[in-house]
């Protein structure tokens, strides 16, 4: 059983995870609009992954005897100045999500909620991976700048991103 305070904070994180998925879907649409289907694919796969993160947290709250309170999802930005800006905003967002997960972990530690600490450890590890993946894309994007040939090469690489593996329950 989780405390009311932990339940409230986890429900807010469910909303933020929904926003993340929504944001990546909007970024995918933007990348399609500017003719970069590989970038769009990468963002679509990120949307799929974030959707799984939502479900994992949702199921945890219910499994701990908590209640789900779905909140309105903020409208994401839909226009960007460049593919580089898309990934810079992605990194910024993932760093923000990391800080939110850390705050949830701090609360779980404060409340001596060992089950939630164990549950959140998966998200802590996931955020390290999320930030590293984005940084691995940002490095070549910064190198090629506005070079169309370079962007097309990166686009082809991003098109190869596999669908996310379903998460264990």
Image: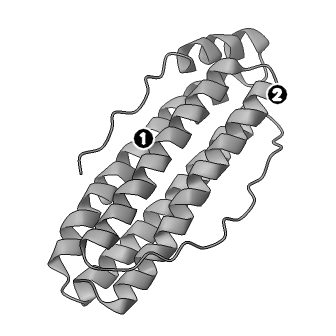
Which dot, 1 or 2, sits closer to the camera? 2
Which residue is painted at 79% across and 22% down in the image? 146
Is residue 83 found left or right of 123 in the rendered image?
Answer: right
Please tell me which residue lies in front, 51 or 101: 51
Please tell me which residue lies in front, 94 or 65: 65
Colour scheme employed for the rendering of this structure: one colour
Which residue is painted at 34% across and 50% down in the image? 126
Residue at numbered disc 2: 33
**Label 2: which secondary element:** helix
Identify whether 58 is placed above or below 87: below
Is residue 74 found left or right of 130 in the rendered image?
Answer: right
**Label 1: which secondary element:** helix
Residue at numbered disc 1: 132
Which residue is painted at 21% across and 83% down in the image? 1
Q: Can residue 131 be spotted in the picture?
A: no
Identify whether 166 is placed above or below 143: below
> Horizontal and vertical percent for residue 97?
49, 61
Q: Residues within 10 Å of mark 1 (few under 14, many from 20)?
A: some
Please tell me which residue lies in front, 8 or 68: 68
> Horizontal and vertical percent for residue 133?
45, 36
Q: Quadrant of residue 31?
A: top right
Q: Residues within 10 Å of mark 2 (few under 14, many from 20)?
A: few
């Amino acid at each position: 059983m989780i405390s009311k305070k932990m339940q409230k904070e986890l429900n807010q994180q469910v909303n933020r995870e929904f926003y993340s998925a929504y944001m990546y879907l909007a970024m995918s649409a933007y990348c399609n609009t500017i003719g970069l289907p590989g970038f769009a694919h990468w963002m679509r796969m990120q949307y799929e992954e974030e959707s799984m993160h939502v479900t994992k947290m949702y199921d945890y709250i219910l499994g701990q005897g908590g209640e789900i309170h779905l909140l309105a999802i903020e409208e994401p930005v839909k226009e960007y100045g460049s593919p580089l800006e898309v990934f810079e905003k992605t990194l910024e967002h993932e760093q923000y999500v990391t800080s939110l997960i850390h705050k949830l972990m701090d609360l779980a530690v404060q409340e001596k909620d060992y089950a939630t600490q164990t549950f959140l450890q998966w998200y802590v590890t996931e955020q390290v991976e999320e930030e590293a993946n984005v940084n691995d894309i940002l490095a070549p994007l910064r190198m090629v700048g506005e070079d169309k040939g370079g962007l097309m090469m990166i686009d082809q690489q991003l098109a190869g991103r596999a669908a996310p593996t379903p998460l264990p329950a």
